[in-house]
Image: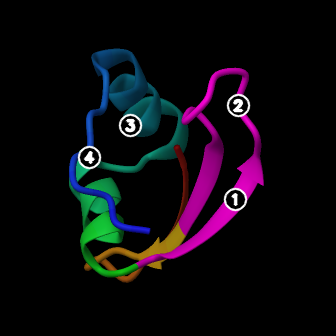
Amino acid sequence: MEIVDLTITPEILDKLIWKHNVTESEVRQIFLDKPQYRFIEKGRYEGEHLYLALGAADSGRYLSVYF
């Protein structure tokens, strides 16, 4: 799987910071460093499935990112 663009809405960005203490930069680093992808479930609409990306940010933190 290749991710070519990443859009994070302001609402999700706020949640990442206040609830999970994760920065936008850390999330973007996961996708730039060839994460492991897992299919989670089929979405209601074609092409809108739920996936999990697993990887480490430059900070050394291991993150799980659902998208």
Query: Is 13 situated above or below 52?
Result: above
Q: Return the disc, 3 or 2, that comes first in the chain's sequence.
A: 3
Which residue carries the number 4 mark?
24
Of the numbered discs in the image, which one, if any, rests on residue 39? 1
Label 4 Cα neighbours within 10 Å, binned few <14 / some 14-19 / many ≥20: few
Q: Viewer-nearest of labels 1 and 4?
A: 1
**Residue 38 drawn in magenta:** yes
Is 15 left or right of 28, judged from the image as shown? Answer: right
Amino acid beneath label 1:
Phe
Q: Are marks 1 and 4 in contact (CB under 8 Å)?
A: no
Q: Return the disc, 1 or 4, that comes first in the chain's sequence.
A: 4
Seen at 55% across and 36% down, the residue is 47
C-alpha distance separating marks 1 and 4: 22 Å
Q: Are marks 4 and 2 in contact (CB under 8 Å)?
A: no
Is 62 left or right of 49, judged from the image as shown? Answer: left
Which residue carries the number 3 mark?
17
C-alpha distance separating marks 1 and 3: 25 Å
C-alpha distance separating marks 3 and 2: 26 Å
Of the numbered discs in the image, which one, if any, rests on residue 43? 2
Q: Are marks 3 and 4 in contact (CB under 8 Å)?
A: no
Of the numbered discs in the image, which one, if any, rests on residue 7? none
Given residues 23 and 3, the one toward you in this image is 3
Magenta residue span: 35-53
Residue 46 position in % (x across, y down):
61, 29
C-alpha distance separating marks 4 and 2: 25 Å
Seen at 22% across and 55% down, the residue is 4
Amino acid beneath label 4:
Glu
Residue 17 position in % (x across, y down):
38, 37
**Residue 56 drawn in magenta:** no
Query: Is 26 situated above or below 11?
Result: below
